[in-house]
Image (spheres, rainbow, N blue to C red):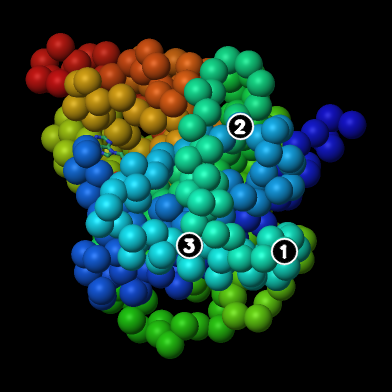
Amino acid sequence: MEGEKYAKELDVAVRVVHMACSLCQRLQQGIVSAGSDLVKSKEDDSPVTVADWSVQATVSWILSEFFGSQNVSIIAEEDVQTLSKADSASLVEAVVNTVNECLSGAPKYGLKSPPRALNTSQVLEAISRCNSAGGPKGRHWVLDPVDGTLGFVRGDQYAVALALVEDGKVVIGVLGCPNYPMKKELLSYHYQYHETMSRLSPPSDDMWERGCVMYAKRGSGEAWMQPPILGDKKFVWPNSARLVRVSSIDDPKLATCCEPVEKANSDHSFTAGLAHSVGLRNQPLRVYSMVKYAAIARGDAELFMKFARTGYKEKIWDHAAGVVIVEEAGGVVTDAGGRPLDFSKGPYLEGLDRGIVVCSGATLHEKIIDAVYASWDSSNL
Ligand SMILES: Nc1ncnc2c1ncn2[C@@H]1O[C@H](COP(=O)(O)OS(=O)(=O)O)[C@@H](OP(=O)(O)O)[C@H]1O
Ligand SMILES: [Mg+2]
Ligand SMILES: [Mg+2]
Ligand SMILES: [Mg+2]
């Protein structure tokens, strides 16, 4: 039956993203307070941590174990280059220990643990095998183990993002958002988030205070959200899943826009000009990671725009999971020329026209695309 297609893949993906979220939550406080020895800088000066590598190894091992390693093609952000350096022995040990601790808890999520702890080469192999070329044919899992690593190391928003692409189309997407609870006011920027969360601590029993896992299957017309699996609780479907839907606001004066925190990642002045020209009046929410896609899908914001500097090539793992969740929640995702994002050409969104525009509905989307068309020549992008 059509409805059954991808059911098993979605089931395993949701379970392993819950596992990965609990791993990250255990690590985030330590990494924020311990500072730099668990955080490394990659060649492009972006950060990578024990959590990024450990989530990638865990997801890679679980998918390979469940579907058979010969049947699993994965494109993921991280590789073992930094871990293979002579001075990375303690980092490798930290990753191996983190992965084995996480995998030992797999039965809690209804998944199988390895018969014995993985050794270093097994963990490094699980990470390095996520180097598929992807492309227009076949099935490829697309993983960003920690999206918004900058947000993660700063104790703020981040996401675990897992998607399945088949014949170039994103067919399922799962976004783990451990720091994005039900309450919308926590979406706003760093200080207010901590200020509000400190009022909630000690960790509230209300699981909806702590975060969420969102997911969708292409063509279902539905996007769902579950609370995290806390403490000794076991994962059991439906795990209090709730349907989410994009906002019905299409009046720009009432709309909220969200955008990347780092102005190096997106031209804030250009997007501010666009927003103003279509009549938006609310201050933009600056949010790390694909939590911005989650916010649109849940109706907490109506617009997300990202205009990276010329020459920057967007990676498919930074968008795949968010796109299908927003679209199945009723939203619209295109590039600045109004064309769908292309996930069929390997690790990059090839042919992306200038930027990405994510909207809660067609009315607002059309206004933004027209505004880009009208203002592009005068911009210095
Ligand atoms: N210079 C530049 N321009 C555009 N995009 C960049 C750039 N550098 C990094 N990245 C990628 O953006 C991902 C972070 O996206 P965010 O939405 O979190 O941006 S921001 O951190 O809020 O500014 C981030 O994903 P993660 O590395 O998974 O955090 C990067 O892949
Ligand atoms: Mg990164
Ligand atoms: Mg990313
Ligand atoms: Mg990442």
Question: Which residue is denoted by mark 1 in the rendering?
Answer: 115
Q: Residues within 10 Å of mark 2 (few under 14, many from 20)?
A: many
For this orientation, the residue located farthest to the bottom is: 202
Q: The disc labelled 2 sits on which kind of residue?
A: Ser
* Position above or below: 299 against 23: above
* Position above or below: 264 against 148: above
Label 1: which secondary element: loop
Question: Which residue is denoted by mark 2 in the rendering?
Answer: 73
Please provide percent x and percent y for residue 106: 67, 65
Residue at x 10%, y 20% (from the top left corner) = 380
Residue at x 43%, y 53% (from the top left corner) = 53
Please provide percent x and percent y for residue 113: 69, 63
Indicate left or right for 357 with 126 as reference: left
Residue 154 visible? The answer is yes
Residue 253 visible? The answer is no
Cα–Cα gap, marks 1 and 2: 23 Å
Some atom of ligand 4 lies within 8 Å of the CB belonging to the residue at label 2: no
Q: Which image quadrant: the C terminus?
A: top left
Marks 2 & 3, CB-CB < 8 Å contact: no
